[in-house]
Image (cartoon, grey):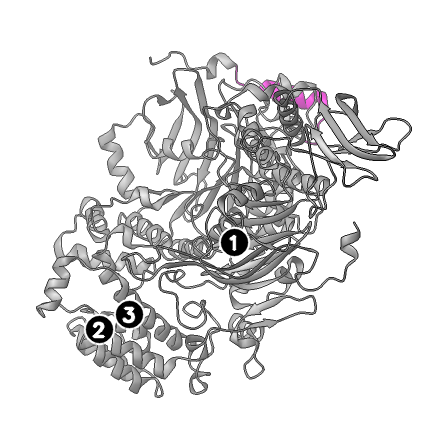
Amino acid sequence: MPDDDPPLLAVEDLHTTFYTDKEDIHAVQNVSFDIEAGETVGIVGESGSGKSVTARSIMGLIESPGRIQPGSSIRFKGEELTGKSEKEYRKIRGSGIAMIFQDPLTSLNPVYTVGNQIKEALRLHQGLRGKEATEAGIEVLEAVSIPDPRRRMREYPHQFSGGMRQRAIIAMALACDPDLLICDEPTTALDVTIQAQILELLEEIQEERGLSIMFITHDMGVMAQIADRVNVMYAGEIVEKAAVEDLYNSPRHPYTQGLLESIPGRNVGKERLSTIEGDVPTPNAVATSCQFAPRCPEAFEACDRIHPSMVEAEGYGRDHTAACLLYPEDLSEADRIDHHRERETPVEEREPTEDPR
Amino acid sequence: MSEQLAPAEAGGDHAMVEVRGLKTYYDEGALRGDPVKAVDGVDFTIEKGETLGLVGESGCGKTTLGRTLVQLERATDGDILFDGEDITEYGSAEIKEWRKNAQIVFQDPESSLNDRMTVGEIVREPLDVHDWPALSVEVRGADDATIAGDGTVPDADSDRTSDITVDPRATGEPVTVRDRLPFSAADVEVDIDRDGDRVTRVTVEVIPSKHRLRQQHVRNLLAEVGLQEEHYFRYPHQFSGGQRQRVGIARALALEPEFVVLDEPVSALDVSVQAQILNLLEDLQEEFGLTYLFIAHDLSVVRHICDRVAVMYLGNIMELGDTEELFGDPANPYTTSLLSAIPEPVPGQQQERLTLRGTPPSPRDPPTGCPFSTRCPVKIRPPEYRDLDPDVWEGIDLLAEIIRQRQQTDRSIREIVKETLGLERQFAEVDDVVIELFGFLAEDRPPERPAEDHADAVIAAVPDPVRPPLETIVDHLRADDLEAALDVLHAEFGSVCDDEFPAEYPVSDSGRRSLCHRHQDEYRDPEDVFETITHR
């Protein structure tokens, strides 16, 4: 692929704010990442880190009191999505980008058969009707390995088990023949054996159809198995991004390091788990310093006054970056501080100019 | 403690909880037909001071079992011996008293705390309900002395240290107070009546009021679980998930129980907070000698915290034994499958995944034979089919599964009427199903060929020992006789796994046990068969 080809999805400086009565929540701040055709890009983070809001921003699902700030850019196949009308968005949502959510039951309508709902999707996005739609529906159910698909088409969501429902949701997403599938914690509500089935299914589908997947999860195990590249989010910002092996083998940001050290699955036989003290903060102001500094074991004085930007963290020119004043590693502390300060965007520029209320 | 020197038999003096043949059924005797067999006959013991893990998929009965152990559900059958006494026989007053000793921490700290009460009130509530403290007083050298005032006579069966110890023979301070109580010897006034040399009556007065004692005890508890003093007057919604779970733990520990059921205590928490709570639970166990039943679906958490693990499936314990043994070298096919499904948090390092087909059967209608038989990847086959193409065997397995599901699904009234009138068959798409399952054996379907003809072509391509019975089965299905089709499937392809409930076999020197027919000498070990599957 030539370098000047735009990536399938390019998110740049995404900033999404929720204006609640009490405070403004800057759920997503300065988030930038790309997704190339055919790859799986992961977003991992704890609850409240902004992963789901990022996904919903891309899908155009941010509703009042939320707002995507001016200056944010989301380009899909080179086309700018921010600022599109609901009508224009509906077209993209069905055929270009599809999304599946954590809880399959809430994404299905309980009063229609699964077949009806799949046929509806096929009618809207591929213009199929009647027998044609039925056959295509059976085909997509088969594609997600639902046994006895003809019977299943006539059944209602409550007659499906949790794993089957998630398969049906994936089938509906596939019915739109998307280029990008956004999966928001698709296996969190499922048991491990069912989770394994769904992960396997997603891998198969991706191989067959050359889909790109944006995969959101808080589970470091699932992420390790499914993603090609990973973005780690903390309090609304991306703090580290790298290829999956690099991230797990040599995490650079102290938050990522702490996260990996605290999961029992990576620390078998260890008497005591390492912890990250304290709790995840709520991003109720535009960050002007490192958000992780209060919990960071390696924080120093400058961390509380300088907002770190994403810098090269590996040193070999590889695509591994972290937003931390400890990097770039080859500079002295004073130089690193200058390096970050120069790149710091003045707060006034990032602060929303007007309150929509 | 001297009692622990007694010879330890199975379930002897070391056992905190001993469970025998425990069953908990729901919806019994109603007009709804078969009951839901949530827990269907389990036996195990939990030793004093140990952590027993209980793992399994949702709906396997692990939470019901935990709730039955603390009598939030009543057992349908079987015994639960707690310190040697069968608590299933207890009446409600005895249960209330006993509950001081057995507490539960729930999964969701969001919904298990009352949002209208302050944290202090929440933790204090069990103290008020049980009119805490009932101070037991031991009088050294005078067991028969009458206790008066705020004190009570200690329970003769209890091996706990008395709250207040009075030593009338002591020269200096005659009173000692147990460590965890929120007052000191200086707060106690003791009046000793004697009859000559004999102590007849000891009157104990604790100076701080009960209200003050409870308040102080709650403060101590909050500190023990890592919360601050100022949190006493705050409300749960002002706390993060991890802090709320700390409140839940403090409340469970308020009455100083010996046994705590932890029902998915960290499942709702973020990873970084999860580690804090796990460490806290371990610290508390060590400090207070607690015994835990740790229920979880996250196997890596269980591996970290538990001494022994019980693996549940469909109301039964499939395997039980030492944690490291069980994780390192699982004996039961279900354990092996479950473990292989855990995503390793190391990229590129996934062990061979044994993806299980389908979902567990309904606990209302469990399989007759082994509970795991409908999904087992290493189910015993009749000898003549042992070397059959695995894909053909899987087709047969799936066919049985599809027929069973068809029988179970509730049909709309319209469908039932149509079927009774002969307008529609219950299994109208038998040809599609045959093509779906065995189509890979025949050539591609020519576009104009009807499904029935192509299904016949597919059946003709099925290898020999399977074809004749399959023809009979498909004939039955075409005649809409699902029952007869299942009978033939069972007679021809069934085995001991479908017919008999497996016995429990010891699978290691440490006493690990597993429920599987394959542990019998005449069959190959599950492990051995797994080897051949994963390396095929």
Q: Closer to the observer: label 1 or label 3?
A: 1
Q: Where does the magenta region start and end?
A: A329-346
Residue A91 image-quadrant placement: top left
Chain on which label 2 sits: B
Residue A333 on the magenta segment: yes
Q: Which residue is mark 2?
A: B431
Q: CA distance from mark 2 to mark 1?
A: 56 Å
Residue B324 on the magenta segment: no
The 10 Å Cα crowd at callout 2, few under 14, some 14 to 19, many 20 or more, is many
Give coordinates of residue B21: x percent, y percent: 52, 63
The secondary structure type at the circle numbered 3 is helix
Chain on which label 3 sits: B
Q: Nearer the viewer, residue A4 or B272?
A: B272
Q: CA distance from mark 2 to mark 3?
A: 13 Å
Type of amino acid under label 1: Glu
Cβ atoms at labels 2 and 1 below 8 Å apart = no
Q: CA distance from mark 1 to mark 3?
A: 43 Å
Give coordinates of residue B460: x percent, y percent: 27, 84
Type of amino acid under label 2: Asp
Residue A239 showing in the rendered view: no
Q: Closer to the observer: label 2 or label 3?
A: 3
The answer to whether residue B200 is above or below residue A126 is above
Q: Closer to the observer: label 2 or label 1?
A: 1
Q: Which residue is mark 3?
A: B403
Q: Nearer the viewer, residue B460 or B194?
A: B194
The 10 Å Cα crowd at callout 1, few under 14, some 14 to 19, many 20 or more, is few
Q: Is residue B410 left or right of residue B185?
A: left
Q: Which residue is mark 1?
A: B89
The answer to whether residue B390 is above or below residue B332 is below
Give coordinates of residue B259: x percent, y percent: 62, 46
Mark before the other along the chain sequence, 1 or 3: 1
